[in-house]
Amino acid sequence: MSTMIETGYIYAVTGKIYRDLAVRSARSLRTIHPEAEIDLYTDRPEEIENGDIFNQIHPLSESWFRPKMEAMIETRFERALYLDADTMVVADLSSVFDVLKRFDIAMTHDSNEAGSDALYFHRNEVPEAFVAPNSGVMGVRKSDRTQTFLKAWQKEVRESGADRDQPALRKLLFESDLRLYILSPMFNFMAFLDLETRAGSQGAPRLLHAPGLHEHSIKPSSVPLTMEELVGGRHATQVKALIAADRRLTPPDRLKTVIPPIEATMLRRLRRLARRLLKS
């Protein structure tokens, strides 16, 4: 049995595509947190490449579409942060572990509040105001209570035959007495179009989450993830600018002002118009 470690990050994947994505995501995490403990749970550990990215690689007991529960149940970390494979870490995530000193679970809301996950139990069992959580980034403090919860979540997803895990998670969280903390969406940023109008005072994303990445960008594990691959060049420029303007991430002497892309486009047009008027 592994010795318990205070904090660490975990990935859980089945199949080659997700396994390669997990390596690429973990590489971005390692860039931001070079000393972090990072574990991978996979159905074929003997096939993993770039194993030096992970501190430990664990075989899953079985291959199914939601191995994240097993990983969080079996983790050797007292406070664990689970990350989906289709994520890229772009700034410091470590404060989530401080939250887990006081709370049992830490997650963001699902950005698709009116999507199928959010409305699955909408009619009778869960109030609309209890917005669905997104299980792609999930901090858990290991205890008997959270172990019982995770096992109940795993059981309900299996027995329901559902092709998603968030409706059951939402229902069980609503019914539980666990201490749940809702993180800023910056810790699981998915609404990329919001980057068009985001100002520096609103803060920078810490993690980018692109659920469609496994479909449109199948690259080998040796190829590092880039912001441009996840969000496109224009939005990548904005993410970098937001990080440079975030007082929590950038030293005061290096802070920069952010002009949202839409405003920048309008300013360019106004300048062009002013130049034409001056020439006329």
Image (tube, rainbow, N blue to C red):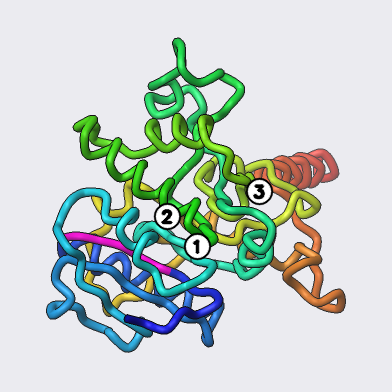
- Are the residues at dot 2 and dot 1 in contact (C-beta closer than 8 Å)? yes
Mark 1 belongs to which amino acid?
Lys
- Residue displayed at 40% across by 29% down: 117
Disc 2 target residue: 147
Question: Magenta part of the protein: which range?
Answer: 10-14
Mark 3 belongs to which amino acid?
Ser
- Residue displayed at 56% across by 51% down: 105
- Are the residues at dot 3 and dot 2 in contact (C-beta closer than 8 Å)? no
- Residue displayed at 32% across by 53% down: 213
- Give percent across and percent down for residue 268: 71, 47
Quadrant containing the C terminus is top right
Q: Is residue 27 above or below residue 176?
A: below
- Identify the mark at residue 14; answer none if there is no mark: none
Quick one: 194 or 119, which is closer to the camera? 119
> Is 114 left, or right, of 166 in this rendering?
right
Residue 266 falls in image quadrant: top right
Mark 2 belongs to which amino acid?
Gln
Disc 3 target residue: 184
Q: Name the residue furthest top.
A: 123
Q: Is residue 56 above or below residue 16?
A: below
Quick one: 254 or 54, which is closer to the camera? 54
